[in-house]
Amino acid sequence: MDGRSLDISRNAAIGHRLGLVSVLGLWGFYFVVVTIRAAVMAYPGQFEMLIYRIFVIGFAIGLTFLLYLFLERFADRPLRWRIPIAFAAALPFAAAIAAFNFYVFEVLDPLQIFKGEEWEEQREMIEEFQARDPLAMWRGFAEAVLSRYFVVIAWALLYMALGYAQIVRQAERRAAIFAQEAQTAQLRALRYQVNPHFLFNTLNVLSSLVMRDRRDEAEKMILNLSTFYRTSLTAEPADDVALEEEIRLQRLYLDIEAVRFPERLIVDIEIPKSLNGCCVPALILQPIVENAIKYGVSRVRRPVTVSIHARAENGKLIITVSDDGDPLPDDAPHGTGVGLNNVYERLDARYGDESNVTWGPMDGGGFAVTLELPINKETC
């Protein structure tokens, strides 16, 4: 049996249980009300009438459940069809319940509770009334049918309301699952945008090292690159990682770039130990650090410090990636902004309004990017 068949069987079981519970609930409530009414009216033979009533209510429950099974055949029809069908189908079932009630109380009367002297005066009044109006018995029966009809219709409407409420809950659960899957897919797509960019730059560096016969440096870069990819690709793209792990990956990346800029790249990483376990989206710092290398280190001939600092502030994790490179001239190419937009979109998809990304040039030169996200140490 496949998953779809299991879901259908499970939904059918839930529907039958809901139908039975609604039938039992309505007729149980009806039984209690009628019993209280009989007690208030002080009818004689209360115990015997209670026994009759149990038989009638049991019969009514069985017939109403059959009505439920009939209405289930139209469960996939629009509401404008189901309501008229329910109103039409309820009438014969209500008539059957009223007829059984009449038979048990008026015709069969197995305990002979209506044959005693207590009922003599009322019986004479009924016979006299019927003598004056031969149709009185049928009118009484029609009234009994209508009273049961309203009970059955009340159940049918209640059942359809509960059924639609269940459908809405299932739709909400499916929508939540789809939304989660969509968010996961979005995070996966955004993260995968980073890896080809980084790989392209690294292969260019390797090509340059090989062409200049710098084999040792090329070998070191290849080992670092292998370690970087093996580590970064072991986790699901949408997963979070500990900040300590994210910093370790960025150290690997900076070690790769250090082969390219051995005299110019200075790394300054300052992360309090208390924040090492904070969860962050995997490779969230990668495009920022890459931009610092591209626009801060590669453009100048002097040493440039790339800094990664983290702190806790007002219940948020604040991470700042900066470089002290030269300011970009107004006519210099500033890139497409894909990297920073990638970071912003990933954080927005993951945390919504609880996150923020700001960036811009610093006084005296250089560039800084600041990430603000909730402190979370439980899901990574």
Image (cartoon, rainbow, N blue to C red):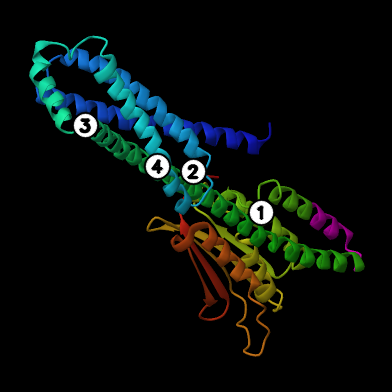
Check disc 1 and give the amino acid type. Leu
- CA gap, disc 1 and disc 4: 53 Å
Check disc 4 and give the amino acid type. Leu
Q: Which residue is denoted by mark 3 in the rendering?
A: 134
| Residue 126 colored in magenta in the image | no
Rendered location of residue 280, percent (x, y): 55, 53
Residue at x-position 53% and y-position 48%: 174
Marked residue nearer the N-terminal end (1 or 3): 3
User: What is the crowding at mark 2: few (fewer than 14 residues within 10 Å), some, or many (at least 20)?
Assistant: few
Residue at x-position 69% and y-position 51%: 232
Marked residue nearer the N-terminal end (1 or 4): 4
- CA gap, disc 1 and disc 3: 97 Å
Query: What's the magenta region?
Result: 212-223
Marked residue nearer the N-terminal end (4 or 3): 3
Rendered location of residue 139, percent (x, y): 24, 35
Q: Which residue is denoted by mark 2 in the rendering?
A: 378
Q: Main secondary structure of the magenta part?
A: helix
Label drawn at residue 119: none
In contact (CB < 8 Å): disc 1 and disc 3: no
Q: Secondary structure at mark 2?
A: loop
Q: Nearer the viewer, mark 1 or mark 4?
A: 4
* Nearer to the camera, 212 or 101: 101
Q: Secondary structure at mark 4?
A: helix
Check disc 3 and give the amino acid type. Pro
Q: Secondary structure at mark 3?
A: loop
Q: Does residue 227 appear in the picture of this structure?
A: yes
Q: Which residue is denoted by mark 1 in the rendering?
A: 249
Q: Which residue is denoted by mark 4 in the rendering?
A: 162
Q: Nearer the viewer, mark 4 or mark 2?
A: 4
- CA gap, disc 1 and disc 2: 21 Å
